[in-house]
Amino acid sequence: MLNVFINMELNEDLNFIPQFVKTDVTSIKVVQNVTFVGIGATLHIFCNETSKLINKVNIIGTRGEQIFGILPFSQDKVLLFGGNFLLLFSAKQNYVSVKEINRAVLTDWILEAKLLDNESKIATVSMQNKVQIWDMNLNLKSVFECKERCILYSAHLCYENYKNLIVLSGTVFNEILIWRLSKDDSGYAPVLKTLQKHEGVIFSIQYNQQNGLICSTSDDRSAVLWKVEKGDLHSELDRDNINIIPICQVYGHLSRVFRCLILNDCFITGGEDSLINIWTLDGRLKRKVETNQGSPIWALNYDKTNELLVVGGGNGSVHTFSLNIVVKENKICLPNGEKPKLISILASNDILVFSENGVLYVNKREMWTTIQIFEDLKNCVILKVSKCRKLVALAGFRGQMYIYKENDKSLQKVCTFQAKNATRIISCHWLSCDLLLICQDEGKLTLLHLQQSNIRPITSFILPQSSQRSTTSAIILDKNIIVGDRKGSIHLYKIGESKPVQSLPKAHSHLGVTNLLLDHHNLISLGRNSVIKTFSKNENKLTLISSDKVAYSWLLDIIDDLLIAFCGDNFIIWNYKTKKALLEKFCGGGHRSWDFFKQEHIISFIYIKDKFINKFEYDLHINKSYDLIEPFHLKEVNCMKIIKTSNQYILISGGEDTTLRVTSVNKNLNSFKNLITLKSHLSSIRCITIYKLGFKDDTNTYLIFSAGGRAQIVCWTLEYLSKNPEKDLLCRENHSYYEVIDNEQSETRIMDLCAIEVQEKIILFAACSDGHIKIFFVEKNDVFNLKLHATIFYKMKCIFKVCNIFVCDKNILVTLASDGYLVFWDIEDIFLDQNVKPFGAISVHQSGINTCSNLQISSTSFLFLSAGDDNTIVLNYLNFKIDQILRVEVIDTFVNASAHWAQITGSSIKTDYFLTASVDQRLILYKWEILNETIICNAVTKYNSPVADLKGLLCFTETDFDVFIYGLGIEILKIKNK
């Protein structure tokens, strides 16, 4: 893979080398054997056969514009446009080698572009409702301006011939204007037809020349399909009475509809709500797919060769899936008019059925075989198939049990068993192919061992007292039996002890635990409360690692990357890794007998409905669904911390989507891999801090503290192997702290965190939006609980930042608030007196301070770099001294109020250099030095990032600078140290 850097015009950008970007996917184009993806100002080129990245083309020198259009054409040439730039380049060796041909910079934003007259001309439509015609050297040849002068939100160009070119303009006034490249006496192009149906601005327009259909979408949450009466738009506009009529107006989205696509037999819409809706041409909804986990859809394209939809959007991912779901369905009837009661699937994919008349049947190659008639099981029976699906257990009302085994021909009876306590067997679980666990009345559990043709009881357990005393799932882990009960609790038993050695009450809701699974040596529990929990086991104790809530309530199983679930009346197959639904099939819900089985790439699901057996098969190979580019945060990244290892960076990030993500980036800064996604926060994550616990047995251990809305702080433990951090990286939740408030109180937000060690104690400082600083002791044990020690009050101002420095043999706490002051506290005084006052306060900004970075110059002096909402960069040269009391004085100050155009949100100071980042998407590098106690600073270079709403930056230096900037996505840069 190669990186290609195209210098647009500014020499000041030459020091910055983009390495990686993950932000909004704004354009996708599939042609023949490659897929083009525009992310920020970087064009990604993928091979369709292997889904591998062929090349990246970084457009250097833009003003943060993103690629909004990709037009590949003959001889491996590609035209790109976005913002106000137009770029033409050629490629060789299947896009491995890329060379710029021409470029142009416009004064207006380009909404649409098209190649004309056998690729000899280029037409562009701007936001001012103008069409510009260019030659292939990007020389402007002519300009046509519509008589209706207005701002456009979308545009579409019809036909490839210059003389026949037709413009569809989507205005801010809810109209679609149709006009040609002609001029009347006034010198403007007249509007030939105006389409009015929407009640909001027009976000996208598409025209299908083959079927004469126009589709438009709007922020009124609707899409309208229009029919050109003559079938051809060019011919229709030649008529005196132009007739373009709306066929249908569809409302299938929860918010604004951004993109549309018309195919020969359907049309497709994509919206801000992350939904892709596929409609018939008469307006009926065929299929609904959520592709971007709640983030908006910005790009939509169709792969005709493979019949795949390719979708990109706000979470930085590109998802590909089959347009039409292929499901093989059939309805099966029992012989003799019998009605099925219980069903299951065997290893051979044969169907096992227990009828209402007590008959056990097997359906093999669509032929029914009667196995046995059970009069004693007619009224009450449990049917359970082992994990290998070759063994079957039937259990009854009086403690009786029958075991069958599948052979090549049919089912063969293995043995029978009668429990000493001849009471009803409420539930039965196969722990392995020779171990069963049964549950009887009053919570009695018995572990059974199957030996050839004999069953022998091994030991018994007892469930704790509850209103519904029965098990719903069970598993064996390291010679321990773990069960989940009907009230949502999980119990750990040690063989030989009847009572549980550990109970986790209400691990899931009162609806119960639905399944227990093993992932390596971790336990995964599923419930009917939409929650997936992961536990680690140490000796005879389960510790919660993570908890994840999904969109579906009744969770059944996780097979490979697939989550099987029910949601209402639908059976769900959901990719747990990509967070995408593969199939939603109506079945009537889970309150019936059902079973599913994955064999290679085919999932079989059977269920009883209306006294019939229904079966369908879903082929994962035919119904393709995968991520070409994996997602990141769904919304803005508010905070990030980075652990630098010998061969990579480990990123810990939190954002508005309430998730904490652990990601790895290699030393070359071009490989980005999501490792863990954790969702325990109740509200957005505003800040993260890291405390290193130490190194033991080749394992690095860190405490991570994350906080934000609802005054919630979560403590995590991160562990990884030094040699291979990705292999056994583990992040588990230790403790979640938040204050319960009444309805009259307003909720406090934690704005920043700082963790230090004082007198062999881990202390956590939390800066709060109500002007308080909360001080926590972190207990040094396996749990690492947070214990609130004290709260000190600064003033009725929001404290944005808190950090720690060590000077004059003292730990100093530094706070920065919305009053623009840099405030210093002696930590020893804080522990002695909760009414302590700061020993120093320096006014540095007119308003809130968003970012601060410091560098120690000597044993008593520091440089403090700060910036904030007043768009001002301030570098203070401070000296600390003890003259009976601790004092701080300002030696010199550098101020720059004109470097950025919006509030500054990120800063980092290093030896000789410092960096600032702003919401204006600019990153500026300064060189600093101190001469005769005077600060001298000069701007060296600047860079415009495509990442919007910048929240901060992190910088690491060796010979070069590795810079990470984050906001609505992330961009990684390298600055060559000249």
Image (cartoon, helix red, strand yellow):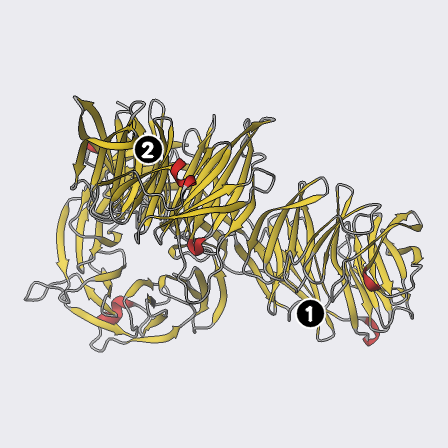
Q: Quadrant of residue 334?
A: bottom right
Mark 2 highlights which residue?
A: 4
Residue lying at the far front in this picture: please name it: 884
Q: Position of residue 814 (x, y in %)?
A: 33, 38
Q: Quadrant of the N terminus?
A: top left
Q: Is residue 248 above or below residue 809?
A: below
Q: Quadrant of the C terminus?
A: top left
Label 1 residue SS: loop
Q: Earlier in the sequence, mark 1 or mark 2?
A: 2
What numbered label is drawn on residue 591? Answer: 1
**Residue at 78% from the left image edge and 71% from the top image edge:** 340
Q: Amino acid at mark 1?
A: His
Residue lying at the far bottom in this picture: please name it: 241
Q: Position of residue 379 (x, y in %)?
A: 85, 73
Q: Amino acid at mark 2?
A: Val
Q: Depth check: give the residue in front, 412 or 895.
A: 895
Relative side of 32 to 417, left or right: left
**Residue at 22% from the left image edge and 45% from the top image edge:** 85
Q: Nearer the viewer, mark 1 or mark 2?
A: 1
Residue 487 appears in the picture as rendered: yes
Q: Depth check: give the residue in front, 789 or 311.
A: 789
